[in-house]
Image (cartoon, rainbow, N blue to C red):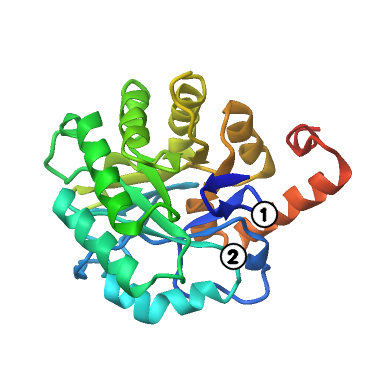
Amino acid sequence: MQLGPSLILQNPVCLAAAPWHLPDGFGYERLGAIFTKTVIMEPRPGGRGDGVIRVADASLLNTTDRRTDGAEQLVQEQLPRLRRYAVPVLVSITAPGIPGFRKIARYLAREAAGQIAGVEVYISTATTQNGFDITPRFVRDVTEAVRTELGDQAAVLVKLPPWPDHVRALALGAQDGGASALAAANTLKALHIPENGEPLLGGLSGEALRPIALRCVYELAHDEKITLPIIGTGGIFTANHVSEYLRCGAAAVQVATGEWLEPGLTPRLAAEWEEATSLTSNPTEAWNS
């Protein structure tokens, strides 16, 4: 499946928010692609370890005060480790505004040319921002800025917020800006109150997010104006979950929370897809049997 001018995935199962140190022996070389943790231009220290808190059996809160790595550290230290699996690597990037996206894309174009297949533009809001400040025009302009810096051949995937009522308009903005593909959805703004602790703000991922993300994928796939391939992401733990996204119209999926909770889950799902493909011309149907 093709997600960009020169990006063809060997498998629809991809790893998102990839740990910098993947465990050996699980078969990550089977994946369609590896998407890095989201990085910013300059590193930002965090207040609590990796900033990920388990708030339910299969749902996580990614706290807003977590440590965030910078682009230079990614290129110099982390990227070589992820590239050893010989599958496409895409760098997930975010910034507070268009100039910030342009700056980090320019840096990656200069320092990581030939090492990455492209970038994932992570569209998110700050803690105190109104989500509706993210407009189709903003998404278009961010995408266009990143595309201009990276050139025509790089894959530019835009990851959109989990807003079913607005995701199609935002997707059209990304498409107009030159995106290669779309991802639905990123984390949902949430709050967790630990026992005897202060409220924690962050983004919800995992099981609780899946029904919303599935609806976002469905909305995008059933809009005749949207022609870009879609990657579904949110709460994928089983082959059936992968199948649900594909049946809603996704061309591929990303696994993040599932891999955090069970290292090696993503390559296992990729291997199951390969096995299903070898048995039938319709692996999606085979996974449901």
Residue shown at the point (62%, 38%) measured from the top left? 241
Question: How far across and down, in percent of the image, does residue 90 sit?
Answer: 45, 60
- Element marked by disc 1: loop
Q: Check disc 1 and give the amino acid type.
A: Gln
Q: Nearer the viewer, residue 223 or 23?
A: 223
Q: Say whether residue 40 is visible.
A: no
Q: Check disc 2 and give the amino acid type.
A: Val
Which disc is residue 163 wearing?
A: none
Residue positioned most to the right: 279
Q: How many marks?
A: 2
Which residue position holds label 2?
87
Within 10 Å of disc 2 (Cα), the crowding (few <14, some 14-19, many 20+) is: many
Answer with left or right where residue 202 lies relative to residue 97.
Answer: right
The reply to whether discs 1 and 2 touch (Cβ–Cβ < 8 Å) is yes
- Marks 1 and 2 sit apart, C-alpha to C-alpha, by 9 Å
- Element marked by disc 2: loop
Residue shown at the point (44%, 28%) measured from the top left? 216
Residue shown at the point (39%, 56%) measured from the top left? 119
Question: How far across and down, in percent of the image, does residue 93 sit?
Answer: 31, 57
Task: Give the mark, 1 or 2, whose residue is nearer the N terminus.
Answer: 1
Answer with left or right where residue 277 lies relative to residue 203.
Answer: right
Q: Say whether residue 25 is visible.
A: yes
Above or below for 123 versus 103: above
Q: Nearer the viewer, residue 57 or 8?
A: 8
Question: How far across and down, in percent of the image, does residue 23 sit?
Answer: 58, 74
Q: Quadrant of residue 105?
A: bottom left
Which residue position holds label 1?
10
> Which quadrant, please, contains the C terminus?
top right
Q: Nearer the viewer, residue 185 or 229?
A: 229
Above or below for 157 versus 40: above
Residue positioned most to the left: 128
